[in-house]
Amino acid sequence: MSAPSHISPAHPGLFRPAWIIAISVFLNFAGFTLIIPVLPFSVARYVTPTDVAWWVSLILALYSLCAFLAAPVLGAMSDRFGRRPVILLSLGGAALGFGLFGVGGSIAVLVVGRVIEGLTAGSISALYAYVADTHAPTERGRVFGTLGAAGGLGFMAGPVVGGALGQVSLSAPLFGAAGLALANCGLVWFLLPESRPRSKGAPWRLHHFNAIAQLLHVLRERRIRPLFAAVFCFAFAGAAMQANLTVILRDLFAFGPAGIGFILACVGVMDVVSQGIAAPRLQRRFGEQPVATAGLVINGLGLALIALLPLHAAVPVLVAGIAIVTFGDGLFQPSVSALIANAAPVERQGEVQGANQAQQAIARTTGPLLAAWLYGLSASAPYAVGAGVVVLAATWRVRKLR
């Protein structure tokens, strides 16, 4: 499949659109994770010590809620008005949100900063739609794997750099994240051509900005529904695990910030290996459907292993569990992204990718809330339940394959 005629064919070396998108995804993830080490400390400047955990949870939940409301709308807008305007709007919103958070002054300013960032969280869905515009269905899995590896590198670098900047000033990582978002804007503005020119159609009305209506519209597609169900189960279990992982590391292993940073770096390394190396090779050999299902099974096994940690708190078990979870993640995500892109109608790629990001935002909001309640019952419960959800999704996928 050749590139559409409105894409400039001459993009040598690093200036090819696929590489520009990969660099953009790296900057996106690096900026997003840059603030992780200082988030609770930034909040603690404006609230009492007993309220820090509540405000951090509220700020994270607000971001996910705003992303849910915005992602389907921004995805549909990218189908109508082009990918570049939505990517640039999203990156500009991220820069403004990070900048406000860095300036601070009150807890209200921090909340407004995260709300702005959430309401403009459409760059990833537009970038994924860009890949679908410019690559044949047989090539998409490989490219999504490359993007996953780029995101893994960003996830690996962000917390390390953020922790170092946090030693200088609590605001430095936030301003650094804003700077990365602006650099990303420049990259897209100067080097990424439009893949989908503005389409003609009826003017946009108020109902086009209804996120729930946009999501339900996508779910009418029979080929999309089972893929979205698998993604939701996977994202729900992953969010539940991540919500309490740092608590497990602190309570069972007495890890400090450096130890937690090391574990996050290991996750990034495994993401690069699984999404950038293993997934493309397995997809060529077996196809995206079996690899996505295998990724779910492996992910569930890793979660079950982590659930054993409260019974046997051994570092090798911890490392093995996280490595297995991340490897399964790396097989599932690029494979299911390719399946969703291939199942979506050509003229609705942005809408479908935006709806996918929206339902993951729902999972990232509800998963941690359930995990917090389950953790109060048993330290193993969030991981055991997550493993069960993922394995059920995998079993259902196997039945669909047959």
Image (cartoon, rainbow, N blue to C red):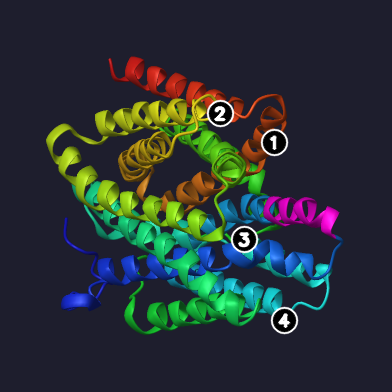
In the image, residue 281 lies at what x, y percent?
Answer: 15, 43
Q: Give the CA distance from mark 3 to mark 2.
A: 53 Å
Cβ atoms at labels 4 and 3 below 8 Å apart = no
Q: Give the CA distance from mark 2 to mark 1.
A: 16 Å
Answer few, some or many: residues within 10 Å of disc 4's Cα (few below 14, many 20 plus, some between 14 and 19): some
Q: Which residue is mark 3?
A: 204
Closer to the N terminus: mark 3 or mark 2? 3
In the rendered view of the protein, which quadrant contains the N terminus? bottom left
Q: Does residue 275 sit above or below 123 in this rendering?
A: above
Closer to the N terminus: mark 2 or mark 1? 2
User: SS at mark 4?
Assistant: helix
Between label 2 and label 1, give the one nearer the viewer. Answer: 2
Residue placed furthest toward the right: 48
In the image, residue 241 lies at what x, y percent?
Answer: 54, 38
Q: Residue at x 53, y 46 (%)?
A: 355
In the rendered view of the protein, which quadrant contains the C terminus? top left
Whether residue 296 is in magenta: the answer is no
Q: Residue at x 51, y 24 (%)?
A: 389
Answer few, some or many: residues within 10 Å of disc 2's Cα (few below 14, many 20 plus, some between 14 and 19): some
Which amino acid does the dot numbered 4 rest on? Val
Q: Which mark is residue 372?
A: 1
Q: Which residue is mark 4?
A: 103
- Report whether residue 5 is seen: yes
User: SS at mark 2?
Assistant: loop
Which amino acid does the dot numbered 3 rest on? Trp
Region of the chain picked out in magenta, as a range: 49-62
Q: Which residue is mark 2?
A: 310
Asked which quadrant contains residue 391, the reply is: top left
